[in-house]
Image (cartoon, rainbow, N blue to C red):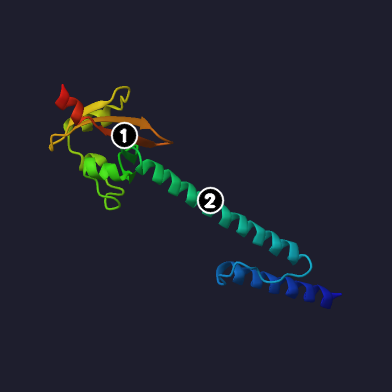
């Protein structure tokens, strides 16, 4: 009886070692073959791994579609934290606002767009109306800021220079 229990413990310990090796060292997608009670466990882990891989691929494609859509917008788009830390901007934001992506990732937008009106607009947090801003380059911008997700802001800047030239 003691020999059977000892053998069973050794067998389980061996399977635990194989599982640990597969999870932390071996980079293959296929788990080690399992027997007995280990077979459904290893199969379940393998299925979960395949589902996670598929989900990561789907999320990656969703992010690509979002970025592609944001790049095709006729406005500059910047995503920031509530404190103003930039974590994404589209190509038009680089063009119009002079941002550099990915170099400006994490930089505070107030350190990059140094206009007192803009600083005041962000600090008062009254985004019910857009901010009309004239850049040093002579461009006229209409800037709208809105809450995006938890503790994040979406900033949309539209070049309205042509409207000011006509008037």
Q: Quadrant of residue 52?
A: bottom right
Q: Quadrant of the N terminus?
A: bottom right
Point out residue 93 in the picture as x, y percentages from the top left corner. Answer: 27, 42
**Lateral position of residue 105 relative to residue 53, left or right:** left
**Lateral position of residue 166 relative to residue 40, left or right:** left
Badge 1 element: strand
Q: Which label belongs to residue 28?
A: none
160 to 45, vertically: above or below: above
Q: Quadrant of the C terminus?
A: top left
Report the number of numbered marks.
2
The reply to whether residue 94 is in sight is yes
Q: Could you tell me which residue is drawn at 78 percent across and 73 percent down?
A: 8
Outermost residue, front direction?
Answer: 166
Point out residue 108 in the picture as x, y percentages from the top left corner. Answer: 27, 43
Give yes or no for contact between labels 2 and 1 (Cβ–Cβ under 8 Å).
Answer: no
**Lateral position of residue 11 relative to residue 62, left or right:** right
Q: Could you tell me which residue is drawn at 32 percent across and 35 percent down?
A: 155
38 to 143, vertically: above or below: below
Outermost residue, bottom direction?
Answer: 3
Badge 2 element: helix
Per the image, the residue denoted by label 2 is: 58
Q: Which label belongs to residue 156?
A: 1
50 to 164, vertically: above or below: below
Q: Quadrant of residue 96?
A: top left
Point out residue 135 in the picture as x, y percentages from the top left corner. Answer: 16, 35
Q: CA distance from mark 2 to mark 1?
A: 27 Å
Q: Earlier in the sequence, mark 2 or mark 1?
A: 2
Nearer to me, 7 or 47: 47
The reply to whether residue 108 is in sight is no
Q: Could you tell me which residue is drawn at 79 percent across and 68 percent down?
A: 36
């Amino acid at each position: 009886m003691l020999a059977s229990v000892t053998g069973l413990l050794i067998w389980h310990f061996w399977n635990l070692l194989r599982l640990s090796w597969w999870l932390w060292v071996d980079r293959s997608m296929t788990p080690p073959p399992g027997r007995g009670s280990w077979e459904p466990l290893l199969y379940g882990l393998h299925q979960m791994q395949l589902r996670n891989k598929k989900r990561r691929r789907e999320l990656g494609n969703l992010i690509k579609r979002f970025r592609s859509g944001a790049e095709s917008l006729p406005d500059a788009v910047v995503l920031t934290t509530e404190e103003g830390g930039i974590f994404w901007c589209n190509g038009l934001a680089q063009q119009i606002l002079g941002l550099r992506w990915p170099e400006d990732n994490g930089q505070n937008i107030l350190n990059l767009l140094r206009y007192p009106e803009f600083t005041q607009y962000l600090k008062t947090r009254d985004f019910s109306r857009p901010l009309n801003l004239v850049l040093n380059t002579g461009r006229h911008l209409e800037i709208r800021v809105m809450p995006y997700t938890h503790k994040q802001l979406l900033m949309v800047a539209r070049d309205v220079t042509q409207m000011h030239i006509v008037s």
